[in-house]
Image: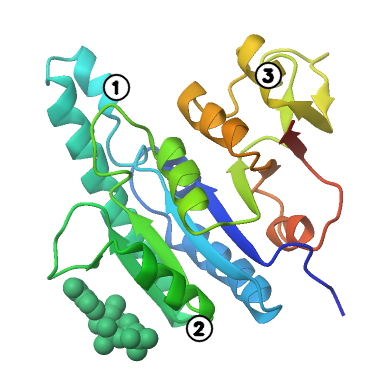
Amino acid sequence: MDKPVYKRVLLKLSGEALLGGSSFGISPDVVDLIAEEVKEVVALGVQLGVVVGGGNIFRGTEANIKGIDRTTADYMGMLATVINSLALQSAFESVGIDTRVQSAIEMKEIAEPYIKRRATRHLEKGRVVIFAAGTGNPYFTTDTAASLRAMEIQADVIMKATNVDGVYDKDPVVHDDAKMFSKISYLDVLSRNLKVMDSTAITLCRDNNLPIVVFNLGERGNIKKVITGQSIGTVVGS
Ligand code: GTP
């Protein structure tokens, strides 16, 4: 049987990952696929927290350029993450995964408020906890929310799902000769300005020595591969 190498994991999904082939919104096929993969790892006894972005619905930084003030735009982005979290919860529950959504911005009719101790109890009971509304503060990204929640729940690792295989020395979509790292240090990520996560998120991980595995969500089975210790993607560590 596949043995997990991590007991508690924070999975970071980008909002764009939910797009599928579209340019806007949520692809039911994609969320169903994610749910199937999550079900496989939950069955291994892994405790899973999830943070999802909101870029498939609303991008705070772009709205800012178009004239909405930054703080308002960021709150709009946080609301987008709540929509995505509810879509994921629905998909997870439809395949039989016990799931709780906790929101950093209180909206009791829709989700539980974020309470760290309660989140931990849910995880201990085998429930997947989806952390919605980012950190609840403007000027922070959902990557930072993922790092923060990972620290709070004492996750062993952050799994950062992307649409490429790992971290490259240059953009692999533009450059054919881009090389992928199997391992890289936090410091190198910061000094080379590699787009893994934003610098606040990376710094938080570095200060608390929390490894990040960057991997391709597009390949079926990759979530389980990372969790069972197969060497795919890039490990960011000290
Ligand atoms: P245990 O205490 O371990 O039994 O956890 P539980 O989440 O099953 O119990 P609880 O009775 O607290 O919650 C039952 C359901 O109500 C779960 O689906 C929760 O997510 C949901 N729930 C709890 N608190 C809130 C809330 O403040 N707002 C919303 N919208 N749902 C809530």
Q: Is residue 201 left or right of residue 234?
A: left
- Give SS at disc 2: loop
What number is the disc on residue 61? 1
- CA distance separating discs 1 and 3: 26 Å
Residue 234 coordinates in the image, percent (x, y): 76, 36
Q: Amino acid at mark 3?
A: Leu
Check whether the beta carbons of the residues at disc 1 and disc 2 lie within 8 A of each other: no
What number is the disc on residue 125? 2
Picture quadrant of residue 129: bottom left
Up/down of 76 relative to 47, above or below = above
At 43% from the left and 77% from the top, the residue drawn is: 122
Q: Is residue 129 left or right of residue 181?
A: left
Q: Nearer the viewer, mark 1 or mark 2?
A: 2
> Camera-side residue: 145 or 75?
145
Label 1 crowd bin: few (<14), some (14–19), many (20+), radius 10 Å:
some
Check whether the beta carbons of the residues at disc 1 and disc 3 lie within 8 A of each other: no
Q: Nearer the viewer, mark 1 or mark 3?
A: 3
Q: Is mark 2 within 8 Å of ligand 1?
A: yes
